[in-house]
Image (cartoon, helix red, strand yellow):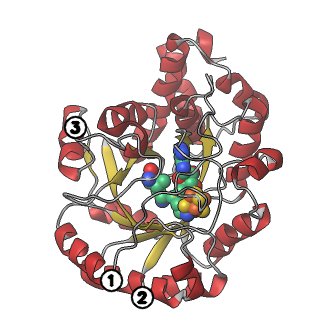
Amino acid sequence: MIQKMATEELDRFGEKIIEGLELSDDDLRALLSLESEEELEKLYHVARKVRDHYFGNRVFLNCFIYFSTYCKNQCAFCYYNCKNEINRYRLTGEEIKEMCKALKGAGFHMIDLTMGEDPYYYEEPDRFVDLVRTVKEELGLPIMISPGVMDNSTLLKAKKKGANFFALYQETYDPELYKNLRVGQSFEERFNARLFAKEQGYCVEDGILTGVGNDIESTVISIRGMKSNNPDMVRVMTFLPQEGTPLEGFRENSKLSELKIIAILRLMFPKCLIPASLDLEGIDGMVYRLNAGANIVTSILPPDSRLEGVANYDRGMEERDRDITSVIKKLKVMGMEPAPQAEFEKILGC
Ligand code: SAM
Ligand code: MD0
Ligand code: SF4
């Protein structure tokens, strides 16, 4: 369809999406099959048109705090899986408080508190609730929590103490692939935790991986799966092989690029937050992701931080290039700018 469209027709296609046109599975298959640069540029054009309609040139900024890299799980794709013999850290309450001081007035719209499924917190989940309370008291900003599959009662307590967003990525909605990725973990429990959070008034983020053995059919299933739980934020991340993990040697010349899927997500979820994560290709990669229809920059690290990311394209590099000042500078060059905080709060009220 899109291959033959001239600019006006592409714009019209974008308008139809804004008016409520929903893509069929066959549309999704056709879009996921696009390959040439020219066709992909057309897709990004439509995605930007839709994004700009709702968000203009304004972008949201999410601060990433990976406060504990301990984990009891064995995800095949993840550097922090419990079988990997790596150096780990768990920040103390004091360290987190100090970090908050450095974050005051920095310009973030939201703080993402992420951890592995750390037994220290899973044995006594109130420790996690306390941490949410501390960060809320220190900064007063919206908080995203990414703690893994948390029990319902802890999710409710965290919400009372100020958590607004619950991020939990299914990775795939293809059950066979799920089994190979999230080894030994229940698909339903993960799905239900997100559902419960949504019902209780959290905003929720879902996400999928690409380049990890997913084909067009399984990607269609995953996009539909994400749609079924009415998320407020949807992401796709390229799988980056990690040293010491079962998928260390897995390399795939995937045609299902993250950028293509970001643009399709924009057409499927026109009003959603869609991340441009710095975790995969830093600020240069952010530009491509925003140009494909993303509207929130994630994995921005606190100033002078030695904290880790998750996929960590920059592991071992000297320069990290993941700070808010560099992000804002680049946005300006692109003709974009940070959104006013009130605009973000409006989304949270959704
Ligand atoms: N432990 C919690 C959990 O798994 O839900 C929170 C961490 S979560 C933010 C880690 C996410 O990063 C995964 O859900 C996955 O989507 C992504 N990720 C992890 N390892 C990755 C890799 N090697 N390449 C790309 N994305 C990765
Ligand atoms: C990111 N490294 O945005 C972060 C992480 C967790 N909520 C987010 C995957 O890329
Ligand atoms: Fe643990 Fe999350 Fe990594 Fe899985 S993705 S091993 S749950 S930190």
Kindly indicate the quadrant of the structure image that contains residue 66: bottom left
**Residue at mark 3:** 330
Of the residues shown, which amino acid type is indicated by label 3? Lys
Residue appearing at x 44%, y 41% in the figure: 294
Of the residues shown, which amino acid type is indicated by label 2? Asp
Q: Is residue 172 left or right of residue 43?
A: right
- Which label number is shown at residue 130? 2
| Marks 2,1: beta carbons within 8 A | yes
Q: Which of pointers 2 and 1 lies earlier in the amino acid sequence?
A: 1
Tell me: residue 158, above or below residue 58: below
**Residue at mark 1:** 93
Of the residues shown, which amino acid type is indicated by label 1? Gly
CA gap, disc 1 and disc 3: 33 Å
CA gap, disc 3 and disc 2: 36 Å
Select label 1 or label 3 by which is in front: 1
Task: Say whether residue 220 is visible.
Answer: yes
Give x and y (percent) for residue 237. 53, 42
**For the residue labelled by badge 2, is the local secondary structure a helix, a strand or a loop?**
helix
